[in-house]
């Protein structure tokens, strides 16, 4: 089978970095472009981090378009408590990038990439959905060039930024609402499944053993693990974002259910909640395939294999 074409939209972020590496290291994907968004840390830092990660894995051929520096309607809310000041804190700094961002920027890079691809492309947004909403507003004519949106965000159940809301959706709920209402095929990997992708000490050791890049990953995941333990009391930090990549690579790893997902944008109490109609009680047509269970072992095997190839 020929590799599936993908564009990753990221706000690195430790788990974003691993998502990028999975997309670079697995022969089942053709990473056509990367776009960056403000989220875990401001845009300048997420762009720097994306460029550094791609340089580390030798993929300076992938164009990186910098996108939105703030959400559509709100001030930016960041997550330095989890990702550190740089967005990718760890015991050692990842070396500076050996290339710079593409002058087109995120929206025009996505447009040009879709136009020049011979087949529809999978969009994998794993940060706030600002760039994707902006793209859909600017280029509605290119919607049919998108095969699927496989996103990390939201939750059927609990939130991680407020009791009700997951970080990526909380940061830009208006953008998320536009994306969920776009009519495009969507796979949502929310906290319900990404919390099943916890990288405990055993998984981090296996990652380390995969080689040079695995060693760097295991190092920065030690920082991520300590942050997750302190903030959430988790003994294994979740590799949220690679789950959305895995859902494109190997859809069988993610069990999903079709659901109607609506995004709360107004309420002070529940803003950013993804209200998932699990039982179909509204009678409204589903707009997303929502992840309900992850094949954890299969997911980590995929990751070990990909990192070992880098
Ligand atoms: C999401 O928030 C970010 O901190 C992570 O990179 C992930 O995309 C998890 O809620
Ligand atoms: Ca992210």
Image (spheres, helix red, strand yellow):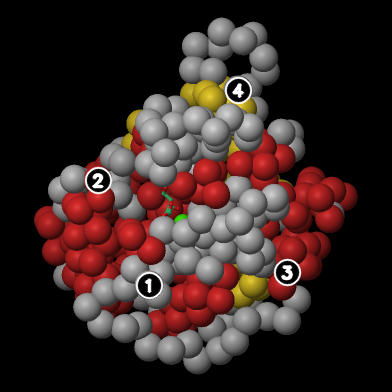
First-in-chain label (3 vs 2)? 3
Tell me the quarter of the image containing the N terminus: bottom right
Per the image, the residue denoted by label 3 is 109
Residue at the (64%, 9%) spot, across then down? 283
Tell me if label 1 and label 3 are in contact, CB under 8 Å.
no
Tell me the quarter of the image containing the C terminus: bottom left
- Disc 1 and disc 3: Cα gap in Å? 28 Å
Per the image, the residue denoted by label 2 is 232
First-in-chain label (4 vs 3)? 3
Nearer the observer: mark 1 or 3; the answer is: 1
Q: Which mark is residue 291?
A: none
First-in-chain label (2 vs 4)? 2
Check disc 2 and report its element: helix, strand or loop: helix
Check disc 4 and report its element: helix, strand or loop: loop
Residue at the (84%, 55%) spot, across then down? 138
Quick one: label 1, few (<14), some, or many (20+) residues within 10 Å? few
Residue at the (46%, 37%) spot, across then down? 165
Check disc 3 and report its element: helix, strand or loop: helix
Q: Which mark is residue 260?
A: 4
| Residue furthest right in the image | 141
Residue at the (58%, 67%) spot, across then down? 36
In terms of image quadrants, where is residue 179?
Answer: top right
Viewed as shown, does residue 224 lie left or right of 133?
left
- Disc 1 and disc 2: Cα gap in Å? 19 Å
Nearer the observer: mark 2 or 4; the answer is: 2
Per the image, the residue denoted by label 1 is 85
- Disc 1 and disc 4: Cα gap in Å? 37 Å
Nearest the eye: 43 or 304: 43
Tell me if label 2 and label 4 are in contact, CB under 8 Å.
no
- Disc 3 and disc 2: Cα gap in Å? 37 Å
């Amino acid at each position: 089978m020929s590799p599936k074409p993908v564009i990753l939209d990221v706000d690195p972020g430790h788990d974003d970095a691993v998502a990028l590496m999975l997309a670079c290291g697995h022969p089942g994907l053709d990473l056509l472009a990367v776009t960056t968004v403000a989220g875990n840390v401001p845009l300048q830092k997420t762009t720097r981090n994306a460029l550094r990660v791609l340089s580390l894995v030798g993929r300076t051929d992938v164009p990186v378009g910098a996108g939105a520096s703030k959400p559509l309607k709100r001030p930016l809310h960041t997550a330095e408590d989890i990702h550190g000041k740089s967005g990718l804190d760890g015991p050692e700094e990842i070396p500076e990038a050996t290339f710079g961002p593409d002058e087109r920027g995120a929206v025009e890079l996505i447009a040009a990439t879709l136009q020049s691809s011979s087949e529809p492309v999978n969009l994998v947004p794993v940060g706030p959905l600002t760039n994707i909403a902006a793209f859909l507003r600017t280029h509605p004519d290119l919607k049919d060039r998108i095969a699927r949106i496989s996103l990390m965000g939201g939750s059927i159940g609990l939130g991680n930024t407020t009791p009700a809301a997951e970080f990526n959706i909380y940061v830009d709920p208006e953008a998320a609402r536009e994306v969920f209402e776009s009519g495009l095929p969507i796979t949502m990997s929310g906290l319900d499944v990404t919390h099943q992708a916890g990288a405990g000490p055993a998984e981090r050791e296996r990652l380390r053993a995969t080689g040079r890049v695995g060693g760097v990953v295991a190092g920065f995941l030690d920082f991520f693990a300590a942050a997750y333990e302190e903030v959430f009391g988790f003994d294994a930090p979740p590799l949220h974002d690679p789950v959305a990549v895995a859902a494109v690579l190997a859809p069988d790893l993610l069990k999903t259910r079709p659901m109607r997902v609506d995004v709360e944008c107004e309420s002070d109490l529940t803003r950013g909640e993804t209200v998932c109609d699990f039982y179909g009680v509204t009678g409204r047509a589903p707009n997303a395939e929502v992840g309900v269970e992850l094949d954890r072992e299969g997911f980590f095997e995929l990751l070990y294999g990909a990192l070992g190839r880098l």
